[in-house]
Image (cartoon, helix red, strand yellow):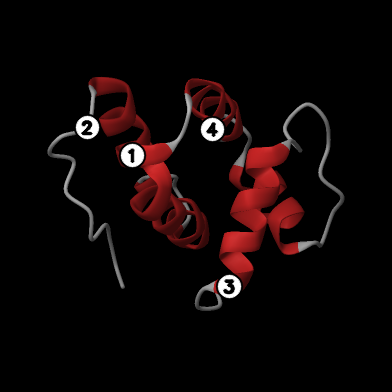
Amino acid sequence: MTGTTRSSDGLDARRKRLLFRCWHRGTREMDLILGRFADAEIATLADDELDELERLIEVPDPDLYAALTGDRPAMAPWNGALFERIRSFRGAGEGV
């Protein structure tokens, strides 16, 4: 897979923006991790989860990737429930 499989049709502007940003991180590994998660979950995320996702996508790719893969401990304030869902989702899917 090289990009989103989900259409942004039917999503509000905030979710469309987040879906795009998850697939356009800057490093391919993070595109695949966050993009796949966003494809599967963006339509059903609650407002507080969207807030958390917006914070997570501001974390530099090397730091977030290291935390998601377990190479480095996740640091507050971005190691909340959504972070754990992304980490679990990543583990359930294809390897990156």
Where residue 75 sits in the image (x, y, percent)? 83, 37
Q: Amino acid at mark 1?
A: Ala
Pick the residue in front: 9 or 63. Answer: 9
Query: Sequence order check: which comes first, mark 1 or mark 4?
Result: 1
C-alpha separation, residue under disc 1 versus residue under disc 2: 7 Å
C-alpha separation, residue under disc 3 versus residue under disc 2: 25 Å
Instruction: Residue at 81% x, 44% y: name it.
Output: 74
Per the rendering, the mark at residue 53 is 4
Q: Amino acid at mark 2?
A: Leu
* Identity of the residue furthest to the right in this view: 73
Left/right placement of residue 44 relative to residue 9 reads right
Q: Nearer the viewer, mark 3 or mark 4?
A: 3
What is the total number of numbered labels drawn onto the structure image? Answer: 4
Per the rendering, the mark at residue 43 is 1
- The residue to which callout 3 is attached is 92
User: Label 2: few (<14), some or many (≥20) within 10 Å?
Assistant: few
Per the rendering, the mark at residue 11 is 2
Q: Are marks 1 and 2 in contact (CB under 8 Å)?
A: yes
> Tag 1, which secondary structure?
helix
- Residue 20 quadrant: top left
Q: Is residue 13 above or below residue 64?
A: above
User: Label 3: few (<14), some or many (≥20) within 10 Å?
Assistant: few
